Image (tube, coloured by chain):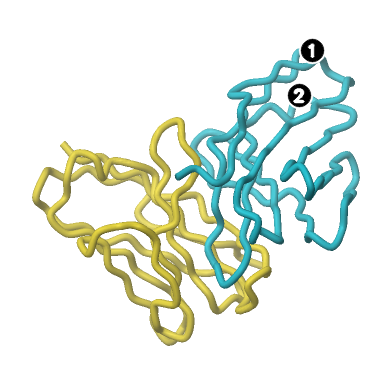
Amino acid sequence: DQQVKQNSPSLSVQEGRISILNCDYTNSMFDYFLWYKKYPAEGPTFLISISSIKDKNEDGRFTVFLNKSAKHLSLHIVPSQPGDSAVYFCAASGGNDYKLSFGAGTTVTVRA
Amino acid sequence: DAGVTQSPTHLIKTRGQQVTLRCSPKSGHDTVSWYQQALGQGPQFIFQYYEEEERQRGNFPDRFSGHQFPNYSSELNVNALLLGDSALYLCASAGRGRTDTQYFGPGTRLTVL
């Protein structure tokens, strides 16, 4: 049962423009959300997180928005850079869970 | 400050064999989790160790077992390997809190022939 879904397998964006990645979840117990970035042959790298008590968290070029009523979160990358080309994973945890539940990932390609 | 390290980087085994993967957590972390990532999918939680005990387990068979040592490093053991066990195995370390960020190692690529 996939509790975290990233419905867009891929995204292509021009350098300097905004990248918007989306993530939906079904488990209403989730209260902590993270985004990870992964290059080939490397492990996922933590990007940014948000707690359910907030609806926005910003760190440099990365902003995560949380819409609890819609069970939806998004990651905005502004401006997009060639080094941002990678696979991005959305992850969540909640309740008594120490585990992270991951989406299937979105591959971002930043075009020059 | 060393991050999460894993060994070996790559491993090739045949069906029915057993394998042991190793992980050293990031400095200051005392919790280690293991994940399996199949091609084209997100990481799937196998189990988490804290204070040398398995604190939580995902939906994996008993062929998957682990251990955490007093220095917080950890091992993942898989017995009776199946072709379907071929995957990237990721170790993540964190502080003891539920919302402490998990930091991942580079992974071990296991191929079962």
* Residue at the disc numbered 2: A82
Q: Is residue A100 left or right of residue A76?
A: left
Q: Residue drawn 40% across and 72% down?
A: B74
* Residue at the disc numbered 1: A112
Q: Is residue A100 left or right of residue B35?
A: right
Q: Please give the chain letter of the residue carrying mark 2.
A: A
Q: Position of residue B22 (x, y in %)?
A: 36, 64
Q: Residue drawn 63% across and 72% down?
A: B98
Q: In this structure image, what is the colour of chain A?
A: cyan
Of the numbered discs 2 and 1, the one sitting upstream in the chain is 2
CA gap between label 2 and label 1 equals 7 Å
In the foreground, B87 or A102: A102
At mark 1, the secondary structure is loop
Q: Amino acid at mark 2?
A: Pro
Q: On the image, which quarter does residue B58 sit in?
A: bottom left
Q: Is residue B89 left or right of residue A23?
A: left
Q: Is residue A7 above or below residue A94?
A: above
Q: On the image, which quarter does residue B67 sit in?
A: bottom left
Q: Please give the chain letter of the residue carrying mark 1.
A: A
